[in-house]
Amino acid sequence: MKIPITYNVRNLRVRRVTTVMTALGAALTVAVMVSVLALVQGLRTSFEVTGNPSHLLVLRKGATSELVSVISRENFQDILSHEGIARDREGHPLASLEMITVVNLELPGGKDMNVNLRGIEPVGWRMRDQVHLYMGRMFQPGRREVVVGRSVAQKSPAARLGGHLQFGRGAWEVVGIMDGGRSTFNSEIFADLNQVSSDYQRHDFLSSALVVAQPGRMSALARDIEDDRRLNVLVKPEQEYYAEQMGNAKPVQFMGTFVAIIMAIGSAFAAMNTMYAAVARRSAEIGTLRVLGFSRSSVLASFLLESVLISLIGGAIGCLLTLPLNNIETGIGSFTTWSQLSFNFHVTPQIMALGVVFASLIGAIGGFLPARNAANRQIIAALKAR
């Protein structure tokens, strides 16, 4: 015969101060874990929406990022000669030769940050469906004009519409603000390819090429370009390239998980102490339950359930505490691009469910030994206890 759950709920109400204190310990643990997972998920989402499933990124063989890659204009013309590249309505190949470098922007308070400057041609803008102008206009080819991501404009006063940025050989006017949704393009600056390459004296040797593959030709096109001995290049899907950059989140994920585990151990001990105290106070109750015919396993399950209920309350509170973080913007330094990536916390239902499961594990681990102690008590000894 099982002990009804109402018995456990009543005991939680009677001991509400102890219940709340123990639940808060679990809540803080769950809040830390959910916050770290939301941060990692936000970064992952940012990279996922940046890459287009039909795009191939061409880098110099051995390069780990666009920043350290070199593609010449001659290489680019050779790439365009390969079949399988999609074309626009006018018949022009959808392929963009680009140059990536890092510029330093001043922030309020004497701080600064590194930002990726991407030199592109008009076709490079058209190929990125997830990016649109939020304010202002597009830069004009041949002019020292830039379009900056929303995150960059929010952090640097000089990067706002009408402002001027100092890099290369002089000042560049901010003529537009772009919105890349959740993509990493919010953390970049776009400018005319020829003007950027001229400023940095890299007219012939640029960084990468982005091409759109025809439907069903992606793998064949990638192999065809890689096998071209004139090029010595590495070709990979753009989505795969950005997925590899998730390594930037591993240190944060490790430290957050480590802290959450340490806190979980503390919360488990807190739950254990609470349940041991409950067992000691309710010794006569335990004896009475046994006299009424409830088995040892029923007593064990009842006290274990009570511990789990306390932790579940804490898990729910912890998830509620993290909800205000959803869509809050943060940033992380990238060891791949040597620039700051801005992205939003992304608290998903799956992450919250994982937090609740984590809380239940804390309760189960912390409550098992006290529950076993309650189940193993002798009936006579339990009835005599006061």
Image (spheres, rainbow, N blue to C red):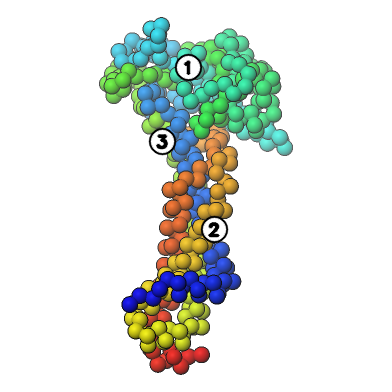
Which numbered disc flags the more N-terminal residue, 3 or 1?
A: 1
- Give SS at disc 2: helix
Q: Residues within 10 Å of mark 2 (few under 14, many from 20)?
A: some
Numbered disc in front, either 2 or 1: 2
User: Which residue occupies 45% across, 39% down?
Assistant: 44
- Image location of residue 169, percent across then percent down: 64, 16
For disc 1, the neighbor class at 10 Å (few under 14, some 14 to 19, many from 20) is few
Q: Position of residue 203 (x, y in %)?
A: 51, 12
Residue bearing mark 1: 126
Q: What amino acid type is highlighted by mark number 3? A: Glu
Q: CA distance from mark 3 to mark 1?
A: 25 Å
Q: Is residue 323 visible?
A: yes
Q: Residue at x 44, y 24 (%)?
A: 69
The amino acid at mark 2 is Ile
Name of the residue lying farthest toward the right: 109
Q: Residue at x 51, y 79 (%)?
A: 277
Three-letter code for the amino acid on which mark 1 is drawn: Arg
Please state which of residues 335 and 3 is positioned toward the viewer in this rendering.
3
Q: Which residue is mark 3?
A: 244
Q: Which mark is residue 317?
A: 2
Q: Dot 3 lies on which element?
A: helix
Rendering coords of residue 10 (x, y %): 50, 73
Residue that sits furthest to the top in the current view: 90
Tag of residue 343? none
Measured along the vertical axis of the image, is residue 21 above or below residue 114?
below
Relative image position of residue 255 (x, y in whole percent):
50, 52
Which quadrant is the N terminus positioned in? bottom left
SS under mark 1: helix
Q: What residue is drawn where x is 45% and y is 64%?
A: 362
